Image (cartoon, rainbow, N blue to C red):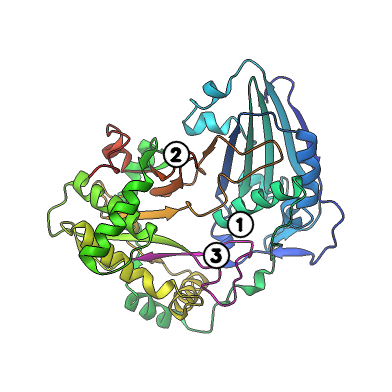
Amino acid sequence: MVKGEALELIKAKEYEVPFKVWEFTPLDRACLKMVIRGTWFFNTPLDAQQIKDALAKTLSYYPHLAGRMKTKAGITLTNNGVPFSIAGEPDLTLEDALKRDDLSNINHFSLAIKTARLQKGLDAPLSVKITELNNGSVLGVQCSHALMDGDSFYTFVYNWGQICRGESFEKPVLNQSLLPAANDADADEVKTAAALAGWKQLSIFSALKLLPAVVSGVIWKRSRPFNISTATIDRLKEQLAEATGISCSSNVVLSALIARRCMDLYQHRANTRCSVVTVINTRRRLACIPANYVGNSSLSIATPPFPAEADLGELAVIINQALEPVRKTPSPELEKLMQLNLNAMKHKLPFAPFDVFGMHAKKPTVVYVNNFSKLHIYDIDFGSGLPVKVIPHNLNDQVIIWPAHPAVGGVEVYFSGIPIRYVSLLQEDYFDHQ
């Protein structure tokens, strides 16, 4: 802790216990060893007492965040509280704090969650830290990924701000039984279904290919941001609509552009088979999962293999076709894929929806994209104004599409893992210019 740092436990205020244990789904359990970190920089002081009071009220809607893991089944609603720290760094300016753009320095602004202690029931699944700077403030929040995915995490912080300002919001749904359960298909049936869906089987031999990236530490590193302007996105939408006859979403345009630029950097042979993977939020797309569902509710959708020489228009068509069936609300295709995923987990089968090792190869053949640009990122307000900078979470998604500050517009693109070796010396507008 920083000298003078104060720590207390914030408990949920005035809530009725809806259940004794918030039970993990198979998707939640798969994320037990991961932690989501959110970091918001403000150029104004934060009212710590007001934020603490609002957190106690917010935890009334999210009581599992103040609980403890007393059983492997999930989080017991003990209301032991969430650690809340206030640190003073009067000699550190906001400008200097924003220069701390590496993971270790950004972690300085939050309280680490130790997953081993969490699983022993010793620590809370959520932590909060406010750092008071010379001319601003930093809010650092960490949460076990087992309790919330990116959508529910950033929505939680948004709702917290709404409560702080006395505004209304859509109440979260904590009913984990809404997620479909695995059915009675046997292991052989699941293997056949996985193969038909194009899923890849993992092996110990293949896993050895990951060792160099793990040992070198590159798999955990992240690049600086690369900017893609709103003007570029809009222009590409128009060009692709004219060239392909389809109206592409911003996500499809960005994924195609990033993939095409990565193929150029990797210098694959023209006929090398590649693919693009998109992380899909299943809320509302699964009939049983509402928009305000709390927990983990995402799937990875891979395109069919395409040649590395495919041009931007061809990539946009391929990505759009792969995503079209799962965009529907609800989506029968997504329902089948979720069922397959849960069945594979039930039987502990080594299958993945995409080529995991191709993503981590010396020359990656998989571009894995997770888009956060539509989530509550920059509209967080605790009564003293909006943030001037929001640092992306610290999970090692290969490609993160992140909203740029609203005053700037467009998006920022971050890379993790092997691609860092290719993008480290590039100009910040490499993905923006044509």
Residue 400, position in %: x, y?
Answer: 42, 48
Element carrying mark 3:
loop
Q: Label 2 is placed on what type of residue?
A: Val
Q: Residue at x 73, y 46 (%)?
A: 122
- For the residues bearing labels 3 and 2, Cβ distance under 8 angstroms: no
Asked whether the viewer can see residue 81, the reply is: no
Q: Nearer the viewer, mark 1 or mark 3?
A: 1
Q: Determine if the magenta segment contains residue 144.
A: no
Residue pointed to by mark 2: 408
Q: Label 3 is placed on what type of residue?
A: Ser
Image vertical order of residue 352 relative to residue 149, above or below: below
Residue pointed to by mark 1: 152
Image vertical order of residue 206 relative to residue 175, above or below: above
Q: Label 1 is placed on what type of residue?
A: Ser
Q: Residue at x 44, y 39 (%)?
A: 408
Q: Residues within 10 Å of mark 1 (few under 14, many from 20)?
A: many
Label whose residue precedes the other's in the sequence (2 or 1): 1
Residue that extends furthest to the top in the rendered view of this protein: 91
**Disc on res. 391:** none
Q: Give the left or right position of residue 254, taking residue 167 as reference.
A: left
Per the model, the C-alpha gap separating discs 1 and 3 is 9 Å
Q: Nearer the viewer, mark 2 or mark 1?
A: 2
**Disc on res. 297:** 3
Q: Main secondary structure of the magenta part?
A: loop
Figure quadrant of the C terminus: top left
Element carrying mark 1:
helix
Q: Nearer the viewer, mark 3 or mark 2?
A: 2
- For the residues bearing labels 1 and 3, Cβ distance under 8 angstroms: no
Label whose residue precedes the other's in the sequence (3 or 2): 3
